[in-house]
């Protein structure tokens, strides 16, 4: 299935983009449907004409305009470059505590975090298999025998991509718990320790750590994949990172540094959550 498109049979979008055959998984099949949905909402007409000088009529609204509008909102609302770390690299030497500075040295040195979490966004935008414990409905493909999440392979159909997930940005990482693609670790320290030794942390992981919301209809299947020994063996055979040995105090220093990536304006979003949207969809 496509990210955010839903499961098979849930809506017309997933039906369009996930057709079977040599021409399968064409996301552009959904574009006309999305365009028509937006064109059919009168309040959006004026908003798009105000935003784009060349849009004079609802029929001028194309998928590129919709995508650019969403992108502009995301950039405006969630870009955060005012963290203590940013202050530090801009010359304010006292912006980080001594503990955070030691953690920074570990991040860029001994702990090898920056080999993947690099650049201004702290991500190389690549995919890696880390053996995060599997549970929940995942992004199951139609041919899978039960719910599981094969990661990037779900899109590429390349077995080399099995269980690989994209390196996330670490900006505001202290706010984005739980951690792992499926929320396997409730704490930042937990996911850091998993990165340092994926195999050992997998063996120590327990379902109670998932801290799942109550959903009676999912309880029977949530941990079917985690209990499957063959699936565990496949998952653990594809770890892309090597163990790194640092002591408990150094782990705490590393976590402290990660907290320094939290923007000072984290609770002061420029636009904020709207009371309502033109489509009439309920704002949660």
Image (cartoon, rainbow, N blue to C red):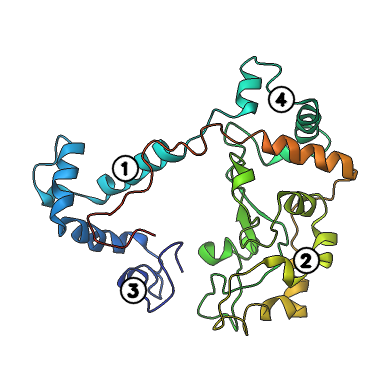
Cα separation, mark 1 vs mark 3, equals 24 Å
Q: Quadrant of residue 118?
A: top right
Dividing the image into 4 quarters, which one contains the C terminus? Answer: bottom left
Q: Secondary structure at mark 4?
A: loop
Cα separation, mark 4 vs mark 1, equals 36 Å
Q: Secondary structure at mark 1?
A: helix
Cα separation, mark 4 vs mark 2, equals 37 Å
Q: Which label number is shown at residue 68?
A: 1
| Residue located beneath label 4 in the image | 96
Camera-near label (4 vs 2) is 4
Q: Earlier in the sequence, mark 4 or mark 2?
A: 4
In the figure, 78 relative to 146: above or below?
above
Crowding near the residue tagged with mark 3, few <14, some 14–19, many ≥20 C-alpha atoms within 10 Å = few
In the figure, 44 relative to 223: above or below?
above
Camera-near label (3 vs 2) is 3
Q: Secondary structure at mark 3?
A: loop
Asked if the residues shown at circle 3 and circle 2 are in contact, with their CB atoms under 8 angstroms apart, the answer is no
């Amino acid at each position: 299935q496509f990210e955010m498109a839903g499961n098979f049979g849930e809506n017309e979008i997933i039906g369009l983009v996930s057709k079977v055959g040599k021409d399968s998984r064409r996301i552009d099949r959904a574009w006309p449907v999305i365009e028509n949905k937006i064109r059919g909402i009168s309040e959006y007409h004026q908003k798009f004409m105000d935003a784009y000088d060349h849009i004079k009529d609802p029929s001028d609204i194309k998928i590129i305009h919709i995508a650019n509008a969403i992108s502009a909102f995301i950039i405006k609302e969630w870009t955060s470059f005012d963290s203590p770390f940013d202050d530090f690299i801009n010359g304010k030497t006292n912006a980080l505590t001594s503990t955070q500075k030691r953690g920074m040295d570990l991040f860029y040195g001994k702990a090898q975090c920056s080999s993947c979490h690099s650049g201004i966004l702290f991500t190389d935008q690549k995919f890696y298999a880390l053996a995060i414990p599997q549970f929940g409905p995942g992004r199951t493909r139609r041919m899978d025998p039960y719910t599981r999440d094969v990661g990037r392979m779900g899109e590429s159909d390349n077995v080399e991509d099995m269980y690989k997930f994209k390196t996330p940005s670490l900006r505001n990482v202290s706010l984005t718990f739980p951690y792992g693609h499926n929320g396997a670790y409730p704490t930042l320290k937990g996911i850091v320790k998993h990165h340092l030794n994926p195999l050992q942390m997998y063996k120590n992981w327990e379902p109670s750590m998932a801290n799942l919301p109550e959903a009676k209809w999912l309880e029977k299947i949530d941990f079917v994949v985690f209990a499957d020994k063959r699936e565990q063996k496949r998952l653990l055979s594809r770890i892309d990172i090597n163990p790194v040995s640092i002591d408990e105090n150094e782990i705490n220093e590393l976590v402290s540094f990660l907290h320094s990536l939290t923007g000072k304006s984290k609770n002061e979003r420029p636009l904020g959550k709207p009371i309502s949207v033109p489509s009439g969809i309920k704002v949660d």
